[in-house]
Image (cartoon, helix red, strand yellow):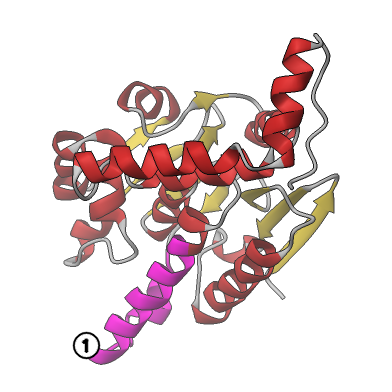
Amino acid sequence: MSISIERDGGIATVTVDRTEAMNALDRPTLEELRDSLEELAADAAVGVVIVTGAGAKAFVAGADIKYMSGLGVEEATLWGELGHRTGQLLETMPKPTIAAIEGFALGGGCEVALACDLRYASPGAKLGQPEINLGIIPGWGGTQRLARVCGVGVAKDLVLTGRLVGSEEALRLGLVNGVHDPALEKAREVAELLVSKSPLALAAAKRALNHALQGDHVENLQREADEFGGLFGSDDAREGLTAFAEKREPHFTGR
């Protein structure tokens, strides 16, 4: 098993542990990661998911190049689709996802991080999409998510040149939300804050935000209005508004 899950007070930490390969993702590991994320997405006891890599050298150094070297066209397409399914789980599960990046997050590793809602990197982290140097392109959503997160200009710079960026440049580009040592400690701090919020409101906010850069603007505003209005039928909204009026901390139940 190359994927471990640690649950603690509504926070699940998923660790990729292939330190002998810089946590690179081969097919069994990627399938295991996908299955773990499917499990956590459906687990109502989990409010936030953190993804990290074992050791200090790499978050995920990328997809396993040795494995990819033997792929044909059809196999490579299916490999890309498996990566897409994994990224979509991180992007769309109804709870926040956080990447804690120590060391290298390259290629598929950067794509896994990009699929998370928030990203925190250690001072020594290196991120990038160097696939162009292998005669290929990012295949797990990198061209799309990097453009959405950082803008098309930055995405073209990193994808076309294949250059790597350190954590401070990544912060300036908007590729990460913060630089902290260690990154996992900051990710847990933010996760603790998030699990104190209403899970219904977090899920609604994530759904609305995920549509911000796609589709019709007017339709998205209506979607936001629908999400906003729908929450007023929840116990959590009543609790939050009442707690504010009573000058106390709210206690959310997810109902």
Residue visible at 39% across and 54% down?
111
Q: Is residue 72 magenta?
A: yes
Residue visible at 39% across and 39% down?
224
Where does the image place residue 163, in percent across and percent down from the top left? 25, 42
Quarter the N terminus occupies: bottom right
Side of 216 relative to 105 (left or right): left
Where does the image place residue 48, in percent across and percent down from the top left? 68, 46
> Which residue, given by chain and number where applicable, does mark 1 sit on?
73
Question: Which secondary structure is most common in the magenta stretch?
Answer: helix
Q: Amino acid at mark 1?
A: Val
Side of 41 relative to 104 (left or right): right
Residue visible at 40% across and 37% down?
225
Q: Residues within 10 Å of mark 1 (few under 14, many from 20)?
A: few
Q: Nearer the viewer, residue 195 or 252?
A: 252
Side of 145 relative to 227 (left or right): left
Side of 214 relative to 204 (left or right): left
What segment carries the magenta color? 63-88
Up/down of 38 relative to 70, above or below: above
Residue visible at 81% across and 11% down?
246
